[in-house]
Amino acid sequence: MMREQIASRVGSIVNSFTSPISIKEMPIAPLLNPVSRFSRRSSEVQPNSSRRRNSSRTVVLNSVGKGLWSPSLRPDLNYIDQPGNYGIGEGYFLNNRLPTGDLFRNFFSFKLPRLKKGESVIRATLQVTRFNSAAGDPVETLGFFDVSTPSSILRTSVSLGVNPAIYEDLGSGKNYGLFSVSTTGNSFDLINFRLNRSAARDINRSRSRLFSVGSSIQSLNDTGTPFAENLFTLSNANGVVRLVLQVRTQ
């Protein structure tokens, strides 16, 4: 059932209104427009040069999955299903930046390394390309959360899935940190989010080699702005999403 719902919403934007509209009135879901000015590196391990008893090494993991989920979508609108998009918050119309009424949360999945005996993750930092934001608040509160939905299900859609339970899962449960994020800045910036100790513990306890993090904007409509509030809009597969692990060695 889920795949049929998803399949019905993929593809290019089409005129789904009963009367003609201009391209400026067409909605986006923090989606659209591929770019290619991002550098991507393969996962790498960088041993710490320190020879102290409690030394550490850094493990850099590229995302193996990222995308959006919504609880529902307006039947009179069609959104571009841009592969690799992870824009969250409110969907909006291009001509006036007003919200469409549809909401989005995202996920990032990573393949965890096999740690050696005696090793443990002591710090986890998520690095995400900023991309853009609509004309909402100057600062939004972004929250990261644990995810119980299996990664294999999260990644069944090209980028945009529709399921109220998965949408709820991506923005609730165990909190991995709250961050104030400016909605202005260079779209190519790589933002660092140092996750809290709960994230490091869950990574160490993970029985699966696939680890996922969900995120949602916690400050929607806090100031009563009429404009859509979102982060990471116009993102795509070229955006860099990495999990940087600090691993204690013995």
Image (cartoon, rainbow, N blue to C red):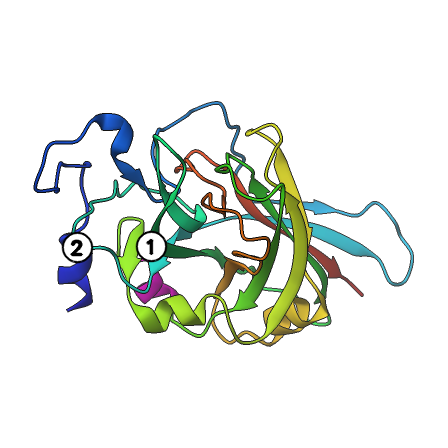
Quarter of the N terminus within the rendering: bottom left
Vertical relation: 139 (above or below) 234: below
Q: Which residue is mark 1?
A: 102
Q: CA distance from mark 2 to mark 1?
A: 11 Å
Residue 133: % across, % down: 50, 38
Element assignment for label 2? loop
Q: Of the residues under marks 2 and 1, which one precedes in the sequence? A: 2
Q: Do we see residue 198 in this rendering?
A: yes
Question: As rendered, which of 61 and 89 lies closer to the eye?
Answer: 89
Question: As rendered, which of 249 and 241 lies closer to the eye?
Answer: 241
| Main SS class of the magenta portion in the image | helix
Q: Residue at x 43, y 33 (%)?
A: 238
Residue 123: % across, % down: 72, 60
Element assignment for label 1? strand
Quarter of the C terminus within the rendering: bottom right
Residue lying furthest left: 18
Question: As rendered, which of 208 and 66 lies closer to the eye?
Answer: 66
- Locate residue 155: give its quadrant: bottom left
Q: Amino acid at mark 1?
A: Asp
Asked if the magenta segment contains residue 55, the reply would be: no
Judge from the rendering whether residue 240 lies leftward or rightward of residue 247; answer left or right. left
Marks 2 & 1, CB-CB < 8 Å contact: no
Q: Which residue is mark 2?
A: 75
Residue stretch rendered in magenta on the structure: 151-156
Residue 63: % across, % down: 48, 49
Residue 200: % across, % down: 67, 67
Asked if the magenta segment contains residue 153, the reply would be: yes
Vertical relation: 25 (above or below) 225: above
Judge from the rendering whether residue 137 lies leftward or rightward of residue 248; answer left or right. left
Q: Do we see residue 156 in this rendering?
A: no
